[in-house]
Amino acid sequence: MSLRDEKAGSEDGAEVVVHERPTGWKGIYYHPLTQIVLLGFICFMGPGLFNAVNGLGGGGQLDRTTSANSNVAIYSAFAVVGFFAGSINNTLGSRLTIQLGTFGYCLYIGSYLALNIHPGAGAFVVAAGAILGVCAGLLWAAQGSLMLAYPTEPEKGTYIAVFWAIFNLGGVVGSAVSLGINFHNTAGTVSNSTYIAFIVLTAIGICIPMSMADPKKIIRSDGAKVIVPLHPSWKTQLLGLWLTLRTDPMILLLFPMFFTSNWFYTWQFNDFNGALFNIRTRSLNSFLYWTSQIFGSIAISFILDSKLQRRTRAFSGWTILMLMIFVTHIWAYFYQIQYIRPGASDIDILDKRYVGRVFLYICFGLLDSMWQTTSYWLMGAISNDAGKLAIMVGFYKSLQSAGAAGVWRADAVGIPFMNIFISTWVMLVAGLIFALPMIHLRVKNHTEIVDETLVRMDSKGHIREVEQVKNEAAITTATA
């Protein structure tokens, strides 16, 4: 891979060496967008198919309690591992971390096949959920750091949208498979062949990380190399967690938004889709939900990556989310007052009352993808450092999972549907209100090296001065 000794000025006045990108097939393979596409397909085969199963309500089972308890195990383990997953990713490297993260999805879906065959296997489903929580914490920390480190600042919304679209195709394809297999199913639960098809696909997903490129060899579209995080000691990694909060305390204002980002799934999947519709209708709803996610992420990316100033884009995204929250939840309230736990699960595709409810479910899918895309984009607006981003994504997934574990447990013990619905509405609004001062005070039109604390941290945990980092970068470039 050759280099051109060209230098361009960065936003903070530093000189940046522009690297010449490879050409031909090698250029395509090492293009950062290609790597994001591969990352999307990994999550297509893992989390995407997990979403397809979970989106059916009760994991496709008639009794939703086992699924709810399994989700408690998933998100409890995820919350613990996710908090440190950014540090684990920095130590093991992204490819190995992703590889380890893919195994849990195949096991989890296999546990539902076991439950179909042996109705007393509920404990196995819960245990598989706990293992998946560990694996998911690793996968999503590595995914988030790469997705936010590979694009340039103007490309971040687009890269997030591309990933989100491919990832959600897993939910789309999985739901389509479920719909096709279960279209004439009147048993109330998903068939064995549905779970077997999903197991095969998740097994394929385990192999994809082997084909990913080393992040050290990736050159971004602006000619800059991706900033590869250091691999210091565990002590220094833990110090990095502390320094991220101490040097960038505004991140704390994003924590309520992070905490809420999976809260709404419980009501949507179990207490709306699972409680009102029969199995084939739930499959169709899930298909439409995940399809709408693709359009939602692309739509919000047009705003987040527009020609407007970055601060303007941030406030625009915030406003769109707030409007979507109130439109969908006012609409949903008039349905929620019509039924109570446990629901009837009897609405069919052909029923007249289905039309309004399915369009609401589509809008919930749009809101979900817009919320997740904007959350990632806000993290990317704070930093370009892969190490810091891995830690922030660890915070994101840890808090997200802690919130999800709590609300799934509330559903498992039979809290009224209306209570869970109102909590969802309140949590979403609160998340945005807390994020607003962070957007005002912390989001700048350009990220500068002075903001990149972890990039300036040496292997002993000392923060180097900006000029020292620039000089070291210049020496490294000269000897490359």
Image (cartoon, grey):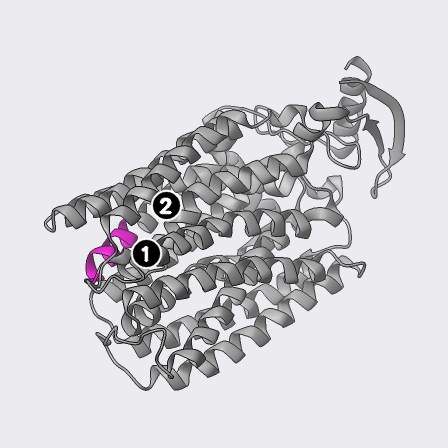
Which residue does the image show at 53% across and 67% down from the upper left? 367
For disc 1, the neighbor class at 10 Å (few under 14, some 14 to 19, many from 20) is many
Could you say which is closer to the camera, residue 231 or residue 418? Answer: 418
Question: Label 2's element?
Answer: helix
Query: Which quarter of the figure has residue 417?
Result: bottom left
The numbered disc on residue 306 is none
Disc 1 versus disc 2: distance between alpha carbons? Answer: 9 Å
Region in magenta: 62-73
The numbered disc on residue 78 is 2
On the rendered structure, is 376 left or right of 7? left
Whether 470 is drawn above or below 450: the answer is above
Query: Which residue was labeled with disc 1?
Result: 405
Whichever of labels 1 and 2 marks the residue nearer the N terminus, that label is 2
Q: Is residue 269 magenta?
A: no
Q: Is residue 63 magenta?
A: yes
Q: Main secondary structure of the magenta part?
A: helix
